[in-house]
Every structure is written in C-alpha cells, then in structure tokens.
Image: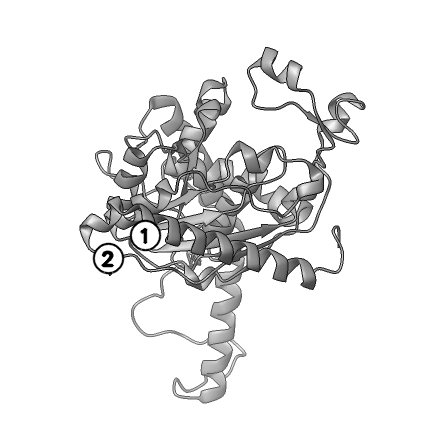
Amino acid sequence: MTDAKVIPFDDDHRSRGGAAQRPSRRRGAGSRRQGTGQPAAVGEVQPLPGVASVPEDDPVSGADEQAQEQVEVSAGDGSGGLERRVASGLAFLRRRLTGEYDVDDFGYDEELTDQVLMSLLRPMYEKYFRVEVKGIENIPAEGGALIVANHSGTVPVDGLMMQVAVHDHHPADRHLRLLAADLVFMLPVVNELARKLGHTLACAEDAERLLAQGELVGVMPEGFKGIGKPFSERYKLQRFGRGGFVSTALRQGAPIIPCSIVGAEEIYPMIGNAKTLARVLGFPYFPLTPTFPWLGPLGAIPLPTKWTIQFGEPIATDGYPVEAADDPMLMFNLTDQVREQIQHTLYKLLVQRRSVFF
C-alpha cells in the first residue's frame, strides 16, 4: 500500500497582511526544488545477502551515492514540481476569488501582472516580433529613473513590448510603469487592464510620485503625433511636447534613459487617415492601412516585423539645483539632447537592419 501524498492548497509563504511575494520573472530562473527522499535510518546498517560491504571512506562508493542522490532528486522534481505548480495555481485562483491580493494606489497588481498578463504578452514579444534588447545594463538596479522612448505603430503595442523587455531582461527584475494618454483610461476593459499593468495618467503629479517611490517610469513624449503619423514619415521623431518629462526628472533628480524602438513602424503601415470618422468616434485619428479596414478583422492583425529595443546611456539630472526644473532654457536643451540621442540611435539601428521581417 503506497503512502498518500498531500498537496498543499496554498504553498506560498505570504502573510495575509503583507505585500505579495514577487515570483521569479526571468525565464529559466525558477528556484530548484529538492526531492523528498526517505530519511536514513539511525544505527548500524546490515549488508544485504550476497553483497560485499564497502568501506564508508571509499571514493568510488561516495561518487556512486552522490550520483544516485542526484537521480532521486531529479525524479522528485518531475512529480513534485508539477504538484507544486498545480497547488500554486489553485492558491492563485483562491486569492483572486477571495480578494486576498494587493494593489497600490494606482491600481497596479504585481501578482496578476507577473503570473498572467506578462505570460499573455510574452509569446508576441518572443515569437511574433522576436524582440532583440540592447543596453539593458543602462537601466539602474534601484532607484527612480525615467525612460523616454519614440512612439509609433498606429496601435500602441511598442509600449507593451518595452515593458516586457524590462520585466524579462533586467537583472534586478524591475518593473516599468508607463504613462498613458487620457484615451486609454476612457476605454472599457482597456482601462482596467492598463491599471493592473501599472500604467497611470501621463501627468507630472503621478510621474513624480512614482519616481519618488523609486520606480522606473516610461514616457513617450511624441504622443498621438508619433503613433498616428503616416508611413511616409516613419522613424522621424515628432515634437516632444513642452518638455514636461525633463522638468519631472529634474525635480526628482532621476536619470533620463533614452530608448529607441525599431520595428514598430511597420506593423500597421498607415497610408491614410479617415479624419471625419475619427471625429465621430472621438479618436485622434482613424488609420487606413493596406489591410485595414479592407480585410475586416483580419486586417487588424499586425505584420510580424523584427524588433530591436535599445536603451541608451543615462543622462544625469541630480547635479542640477532645485530651481533648474523651472528654467525653460535648460528644459529645452535637455529635451533636445534626449530627442537627438534617440533619433541618432534609430538611424544607426536602421543602417544595421538587413530586413524588416528577418
């Protein structure tokens, strides 16, 4: 009669009053689980009939025992790992149903993001767009920082892919909190998902609060001018607003990290804009592409382009005095410096690119 195994229903080590423990985010970085072997008996061990006894200090015997232990551990990982994953999944579902999970003041749900939302975005990131990340070491391991990126693609997929890039590749397992336009939080379903992913309104107050808390904040200053520009102007940066992101970084002394994204411009080549229909629907633009709306729902599938995301060297702001945040000339110079660095990197990546799709 075999011993029955008890599967723990809630195997996490979270305290009900504390914040949720962050699971491992990096692919292949899961913690190893040891097998549950039987404990050795205490006392003298009698040899089996017909088997010669081997001295305890024999080196060959010790190596054999170590190899056998490794085999047993590996066997234990197979069944025990599956059981723990099932138990972890059940525990996750129970916490969602009972409301025993934490969100911050902005609505960010770290556990849901790690275990569900990132898992949904990752196949598009890895298999469809095959994103290549460069310069991830330029993002600090701790403390607040402002990542400024170009915006393109007709549909704001580039921000999500940048978020996955930081989440999966940064050695310190950092999260990126994106600043989004008002329209994002006016759309049903999209509003809730954006909040759960850690997005917040693109305003100076929210950005300063996040930076003061030591968060990574992402902003795309081109806004709708960048994402809705025609295909003929691809990879040409639009105006960076009034430079409000520079003022925010100066007030918090946070470094500014330029980010250049190549590949997003071609996923929905925008060859026209139905402005009348856009005004009726309340959108900043209504894109016309070679496939949309002519092919119906199929036309909404993005083209499988090959992406590159490169994070540039940080631009320090902690050396400026406090009143520098109100200096319009300094804001203009720093804004232009960030914009030029992004544009230069875009041109460099485009020269190196051999194909849009491969």
Q: Position of residue 284 (x, y in %)?
A: 56, 23
77 or 243: nearer the eye? Answer: 243
Query: Looking at the picture, which amino acid does disc 1 mark?
Result: Leu
The residue drawn where x is 69% and y is 20% is: 274
Q: Position of residue 123 (x, y in %)?
A: 62, 43
277 or 9: nearer the eye? Answer: 277
Which callout, 2 or 1, points at the residue further toward the start of the chain? 2
Q: What crowding class fits label 2: few (fewer than 14 Cα within 10 Å), some (14-19), or many (20 or more)?
A: few
In this rendering, the count of numbered labels is 2
Q: Position of residue 304 (x, y in %)?
A: 72, 43
Which one is closest to the eye, mark 2 or mark 1? 1
Mark 2 vs 1: CB contact within 8 A? yes
The residue drawn where x is 53% and y is 46% is: 150
Query: Looking at the picture, which amino acid does disc 2 mark?
Result: Tyr
Q: In the image, 274: left or right of 186? A: right
Residue pushed farthest front? Answer: 329
Task: Please give the residue where the numbered disc 1 appears in the rendered image.
Answer: 330
The residue drawn where x is 62% and y is 17% is: 278
Rendered view: 64 above or below 173: below
Rendered view: 278 above or below 5: above
Q: Which corner quadrant of the image does residue 301 belong to?
A: top right
Task: Please give the residue where the numbered disc 2 appears in the rendered image.
Answer: 320
Can residue 28 be seen from the camera position used here? no
Rendered view: 282 above or below 105: above
Q: In the image, 154: left or right of 315? A: right
162 or 206: nearer the eye? Answer: 206
